[in-house]
Structures are given as C-alpha cells and as structure tokens.
Image (cartoon, rainbow, N blue to C red):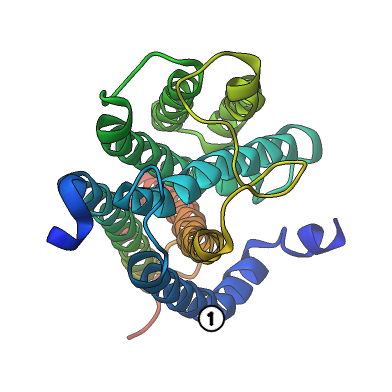
C-alpha cells in the first residue's frame, strides 16, 4: 500500500475499525432479530396467549 | 404527525418496514460502494494532510450519525413522555446501540487521524471530550434499558435521561467555535457553504447518505426485533398464567 504514503497504517486501521464495529453491530442486530422471530414462532406454535390451547400441527 | 400516528400500530409498522427494508438496504449498499470507490480512487490527496484525508470519508459521517441518532432518540423520548406513542420507546431502545457504535467509530477514526496530523491519538479538548461524553451517555442509556425489566417503566426512565443528555449535542456541534480546540472548525455544515473542494465533498456526501441508509435499515431491523421481544414477553407471561390456572384446577397442561 505504498500509494497511501507514510501513514498507510493509520488509514487502513481507520477503515478496519469501521468494518469491525459495523460488522459486529450488523451481526448482533440480525442474530437478535432471528432469535426473537424463532422464539415468537415457537410460542405461537404452542398456542401461547390463546385460551383454546395449542394449534393443531 | 398523521404518518407517525398511522405507524403507531406495531402490526402496520412490521408490514411497512418489511416492504421498505430490502430497498433501503440495497440503496445503502450501492451508495456505499460508489462512495468508497470515489473516496479511494477518485478523490485527490489533500495538499496539507496528504493521503490521511481518506480517513475523513468515514470519520465525518460517523460523527454526523452519532449526533443524528441521539437527536432521533431525544425526539423519541418526547414521543414517550408527551404523546405516549407506542413505538417511541421501541425506536429509542433500538437506536442506542447504533448511535453508540457510530460514536465509537468517530473516536477511533479520529484517533487514527490525530496521531499523524496532531502527533497524538488523544487530547482533552472540548470537541473530543464532548464526543467521549456522548459515547458514555449512550452506554449509560443501554445499561439503564437492561436494568429495568418492565419495558414501559424503563422507557420513561430512559426518556428522561435521554432528554437530559441532549444538552451535550449543541455542545459537541459548537465546541469548536466556543472554545479554542485542536480540532478544526466545521468544513461542510457552515453558513457560508462548504469549504471542501467538490472532488472531496461529493464522495463525502455520498458516503454520508450511504451510511445513513445502512444505519436506518439497521434501526428498522432492531425495532422489529424489539417489537417481537415484547410480544414474546407478553405471550410468555400469558402462557405461564394459563399453566398456573390449569395446575390449580388439576388439569394437564
């Protein structure tokens, strides 16, 4: 990366920080979304919240 | 306001957000790709700062978004306390980690830019310190959400803390004018227009819009997850009550 001059390390470290922080944030949000979706589907399958009991398969 | 009231229904919000999300994500990815290409291969090095100017293209949007998300949270806090909008505290809770991440990016990239330009990673000047305080406020808000179990109680407490913390937003914005700081004054959002050359301004603006689109898409996904979490909580309580009732009647679950 000689094209980036003597401060290439600082420039690359900045973009790496952006990638790591945003990558972690995106992953955390997507995994949480998936976990809630699965938990909700499982509860609805069991008939939670209905007086009539579980839904027939 | 009418649009916000329409969105107050979580079911309607879930349907609309599901339709908007793919388009918003696609547009954000496209803008980020174009912006990064322009920032790395088209924008020239700065006559004073050389190639380190490329750090600006991620540092400045991160700073804007850190402030923007705090402002969104403050408006949501008003929505919780004044209008009791059903999605206000959902929006506020979902925004906090996103704002915190952009504050962290702003501080990290600022440190990596500061070392070669100022000779130091950190200095306790008004701009840097007030952004650090913003990150700490974000972390405090996230911690408070986790401390209180009941969402509506937590929402009101967090709303008050958020509004108190809003005093830091104008301090960050005007710190470079009110005090003698090592950080440079604003170069884009100025009354007399941007002082940056268009060859650098355009990549910066495109990346800013791209990062904003990505952040808003993440915010929508996080809001959807929070709505589902509350539904899971309600259903779990209802199921536990049903099982208790059956047990007390001596019936099988």
Q: Nearer the viewer, residue B51 or B159?
A: B51
Q: Label 1 belongs to which residue?
A: B23
The answer to which image quadrant residue B6 occupies is bottom right
Q: Residue lying at the far front in this picture: please name it.
A: B47
Q: Position of residue B140 (x, y in %)?
A: 43, 24
Which of the image's four quarters has the C terminus of chain B? bottom left
Q: Is residue B165 above or below residue A7?
A: above
Taking B48 as reference, is B171 left or right?
right
Closer-to-camera residue (B136/B3): B136
* Horizontal side, residue A36 vs residue B174: left or right: left
- Name the residue at the right extreme: B2
The structure residue drawn at horizontal position 60% and vertical position 76%, both measured from the top left corner, is: B15
Residue B160 visible to an observer of this rendering:
no
Name the residue: 45% across, 21% down. Answer: B182
Q: Residue at x 52, y 47 (%)?
A: B65
Q: Nearer the viewer, residue A27 or B10?
A: A27
User: Which element is circle 1 on?
Assistant: helix
Q: Chain of mark 1?
A: B
Q: Percent x, y for residue A48?
A: 42, 62
Q: In the shown orientation, is residue B22 left or right of residue B152?
A: left
Front one among B123 and A23: B123
Q: Label 1: how many residues lie within 10 Å, few (<14), some (14-19) or many (20+)? A: few
Q: Is residue A19 visible?
A: yes
Which residue reaches farthest bottom?
A57
Query: Looking at the picture, does residue B46 appear above or below residue B7?
Result: above
| Residue at the spot 62% in from the left edge and 47% down from the top edge | B195
Instruction: Classify the position of the N terminus of chain B by image quarter.
Output: bottom right
Count of numbered circles on the image? 1
Residue B212 placed where, x, y %? 53, 59
């Amino acid at each position: 990366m000689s094209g980036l001059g003597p401060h290439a390390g600082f420039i690359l470290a900045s973009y790496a920080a952006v990638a790591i922080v945003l990558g972690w944030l995106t992953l955390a949000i997507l995994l949480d979304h998936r976990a809630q979706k699965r938990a909700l589907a499982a509860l609805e399958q069991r008939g939670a919240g209905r007086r009539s009991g579980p839904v027939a398969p | 306001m009418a649009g916000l009231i329409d969105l107050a229904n979580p079911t309607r919000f879930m349907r609309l957000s599901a339709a908007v999300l793919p388009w918003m994500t696609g547009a954000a990815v496209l803008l980020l790709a174009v912006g990064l290409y322009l920032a790395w291969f088209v924008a020239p090095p700065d006559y004073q700062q050389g190639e380190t100017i490329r750090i600006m293209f991620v540092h400045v949007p991160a700073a804007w978004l850190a402030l923007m998300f705090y402002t969104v949270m403050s408006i949501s806090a008003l929505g919780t306390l004044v209008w009791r909008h059903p999605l206000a505290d959902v929006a506020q809770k979902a925004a906090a980690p996103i704002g915190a991440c952009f504050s962290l990016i702003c501080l990290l990239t600022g440190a990596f830019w500061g070392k070669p330009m100022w000779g130091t990673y950190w200095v306790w000047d008004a701009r840097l310190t007030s952004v650090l305080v913003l990150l700490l406020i974000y972390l405090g808000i996230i911690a408070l959400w986790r401390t209180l179990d009941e969402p509506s109680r937590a929402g009101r407490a967090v709303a008050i803390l958020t509004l108190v913390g809003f005093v830091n937003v104008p301090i960050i914005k005007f710190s470079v004018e009110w005090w003698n700081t090592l950080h440079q004054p604003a170069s884009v959002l100025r009354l007399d227009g941007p002082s940056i050359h268009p060859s650098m301004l355009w990549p910066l603006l495109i990346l800013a819009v791209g990062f904003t689109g990505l952040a808003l898409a993440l915010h929508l996904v996080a809001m959807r997850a929070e709505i589902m979490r509350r539904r899971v909580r309600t259903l779990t309580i209802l199921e536990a009550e049903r099982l208790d009732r059956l047990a007390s009647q001596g019936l099988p679950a």
